[in-house]
Amino acid sequence: MREFLVARENIENVNVVQSEVELEPPSNVVNEFNPNEIVRDPGHRKQINEYAPDIQDQVRRAYILKGQMQPDLPSFPRTTFGSVKRSFSKSWYKNYTWLEYSEIKDAAYCFYCFLFKKPGRAEHFGFEVFTKSGYRDWKHASQGLKGHVGSHNSLHNSCVKHYDDYNNQRQSVTSKFAKATKESEELYKIRLTCSLDCSRYLIAQGMAFRGHDESSTSLNKGNFREMVDWVKSQNEQVRDAFDRGGKNCTMTCGDIQKELATCCAHEVTKVIMEDLGDRQFSVLIDESRDISVKEQMAVMLRFLNDKGNVVERFISLHQSH
Ligand SMILES: [Zn+2]
């Protein structure tokens, strides 16, 4: 049995390409993420797979917003290689946009691989150096950095592709959403303006809004709806706004008619009050019965306006019991 037990380091050093097995996620998975707590130094970051799968996207987004960590230090620590002292060079940032530098570990990292590497694969191909432990071989840096990029179908380049796709996808969704929102907002404004204009006319003429039968098959849907239909038949833009404007937001239902009338009443009252200012006034109250034998009480104000004319302004109608 003993001959089958091989020391762990011997297994890890075996230089063979192993099958692509996804590693088990780490046991101490983080379930919550606060974008303000992202760690800028790549040497001290948690790996993406150390976060719970449902928040990994949120973590990526936060890091992408911050961008690569490329500190512009006046000098970088020097390490002796043989007889020569060498250090990280900030000129590498220019050629390698993905390059990050950790001041804590004095090591180089790859931003794109950190964001999009597949943990199982990365370990087999030595990619952990640029995402976890950090690259410090300054003597062979020019080959090391080029080697990390590799051919067009390398793991690094697949991470770059993921990064680009991720950005494009976000941009296209954001722009589509913004476009749809702006367009529907404009259509909504057209419908609202039409309904408001009809309300104003009916209020000014003292005409009833509602009809007995306001269904789409009705021959007379009441003054408000008939008037909206008339505006639609005269104006293509309005017709289009109603046709494309969502079934739940046509701005013509009974509740909306009442709300529009109430808004108009508020505005009119405001103007009357401004007219009245701090002048003296008298209140006229008159009661009468309507057709259903309910007492209605009308309230009016009577005052002198700026031009010295006596004006009477209707304020409201109350139902008295
Ligand atoms: Zn990389």
Image (cartoon, rainbow, N blue to C red):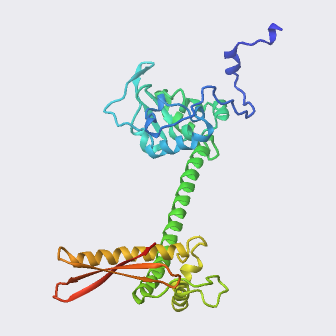
Q: Position of residue 31 (x, y in %)?
A: 57, 34
Q: Position of residue 309 (x, y in %)?
A: 19, 89
Q: Residue furthest right?
A: 1
Quadrant that contains the N terminus: top right
Q: Position of residue 288 (x, y in %)?
A: 42, 83
Q: Quadrant of residue 283?
A: bottom left
In this view, 132 is above or below 169: above
In this view, 230 is above or below 267: below
In-front residue for pair 3/279: 279
> Going 52% across and 71% down the picture, which residue do you hit?
184
In-front residue for pair 27/118: 27
In this view, 250 is above or below 99: below
In-front residue for pair 171/83: 171
> Going 59% across and 45% down the picture, which residue do you hit?
157
**In the displayed structure image, the side of residue 101 where residue 224 appears, left or right:** right
> Going 43% across and 35% down the picture, which residue do you hit?
40
In this view, 51 is above or below 321: above
Tell me if residue 187 can be seen.
Answer: no
**In the displayed structure image, the side of residue 89 where residue 231 appears, left or right:** right
In-front residue for pair 13/50: 50
